Image (tube, helix red, strand yellow):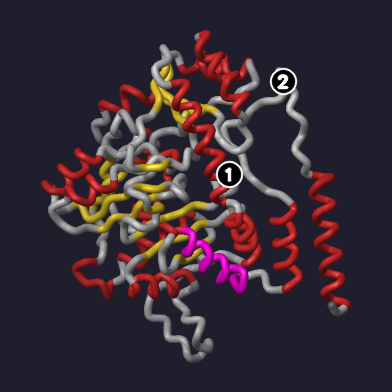
Amino acid sequence: MNEAESIKSEIFSLVEKYTKLAHTQKEFVPGQSAVPVSGKVFDHKELQYIVDSALDGWFTTGRFNTEFEKKLASYVGVNKVLTVNSGSSANLLAVSALSDASWGAKAIQPGDEFITTPVSFPTTINPFLLYGLKPVFVDIDPSTLNLDVVKTIQMVNQDQSIKAIIPVHFAGQPVDICELKNGLNRSLIIIEDAAHALGTTYNGKKTGNHFPFTVFSFQAIKHLTTIDGGALQIQDKELYEKGKLIRWFGLDKKLTRLENDIQIQGYKYHMNNVNATIGLVQLETIEELLQKYRTIGKYLDSKLNGLPGIETVVHYPNSESSYWLYTLKVDRRDKFIKMMADNGFMASEIHKRNDFHSYLNDHPAEMPNLDKFYSRLVHIPCGWWVTLEDCDNMIELIKKGW
């Protein structure tokens, strides 16, 4: 080991010591400490990787990102993925590639319509609005809270102006993929939003294997975080290559600046090395982490199902949710949230439905199922930080009523 490597090793050791001193999880005090709805996993390994990338002196995209893409693709079970700086950018990258004129009649055009659910964050919709597409909101399946696949199929098969579907695997629960794929009578663009669903499986295959495009988010509190970041899975090789160009200003990195002739409009969507290093560490334990979410989620399912005043979400027998969020339908939601908070458990409303935002007032739709349940939807703690004892305490509180 030369002197530089010896110093680096010493720095890594100091980072570990610092992390244990500065970021050790505080002792849980019953009656005082709160159990949060969501959380993140972060320890000295992530910080050591960040320092390693900094010592490289190469902060933009580079060797760490290349390695992260390879290992992420391997985990998902696909050939290649494109990492980007956010899940929103992954959506933008997909739309940019699909709107390129080289696709001729297949390219998406301003005025084309796309179907999606209102139960999602606006970033599911905004990239498509930017390119002039019009959202068509479809009601939810009340048992799963996901996009109503039957209604979606009916609308697509009857309306040729619908060019794309953006199904969202809400809270980690997959949509009914087989029914959606088998029920359509024509081909159209499907971009699955798996921001909540890394590691979610359907018929034994992870999200990322079922549709031509899959969007992942690695925002700070997701199962796998790069602090900020995302990825796009593209099955089509030609579109994948276009995506690589669009992600980096339209430039081909294999060519010199003078050799480059930009033929497709590009942007700066790439993931940098620092973010990628965190993803590499997180991938090492992602299955272990997911199993913790699933253990807690399934335990809550088994104990809460059938209790008065609440309804649990139904899971397809051929699927495995990531349980990124644990969602209930509860009576008297405000009182339920207060009761939980008074006893040290955070519970939160679902975010505002997309069709209620003022900037989307021009796209009204009838949502009888969502209208019925929206005021009842709530998330309760479920994740690696929740113990079975915490679950039992929550269950007993819920049994007592509110």
On the rendered structure, is 221 left or right of 244? right
Q: Percent position (x, y) of residue 305? A: 41, 21
Region rendered in magenta = 61-75
Q: Is residue 303 above or below residue 67?
A: above
Q: Residue at x 31, y 57 (%)?
A: 211
Q: Percent position (x, y) of residue 53? A: 70, 68
Q: Residue at x 31, y 22 (%)?
A: 372
Q: Nearer the viewer, residue 386 or 263?
A: 386
Tag 2 or tag 1, which sits nearer the N-term?
A: 2
- Residue 142's tag is none
On the rendered structure, is 365 left or right of 286? left
Q: Nearer the viewer, residue 350 or 78?
A: 78
68 in magenta: yes
The three-letter code of the residue at mark 2 reads Pro
Q: Percent position (x, y) of residue 299? A: 50, 28
The N terminus, quarter of image: bottom right
* Residue named by callout 2: 30
How many angstroms separate mark 1 from mark 2 (CA)? 24 Å
Picture quadrant where residue 66 is located = bottom right
Tally the marks: 2
Q: Percent position (x, y) of residue 189? A: 26, 58
* Residue named by callout 1: 221
Note whether residue 402 is visible. no
Q: Is residue 156 above or below residue 69?
A: above
Q: Residue at x 41, y 68 (%)?
A: 79
Element under disc 1 = loop
- The mark lying in front, picked from 1 and 2, is 2
The three-letter code of the residue at mark 1 reads Ile
On the rendered structure, is 270 left or right of 342? left
Note whether residue 42 is visible. yes
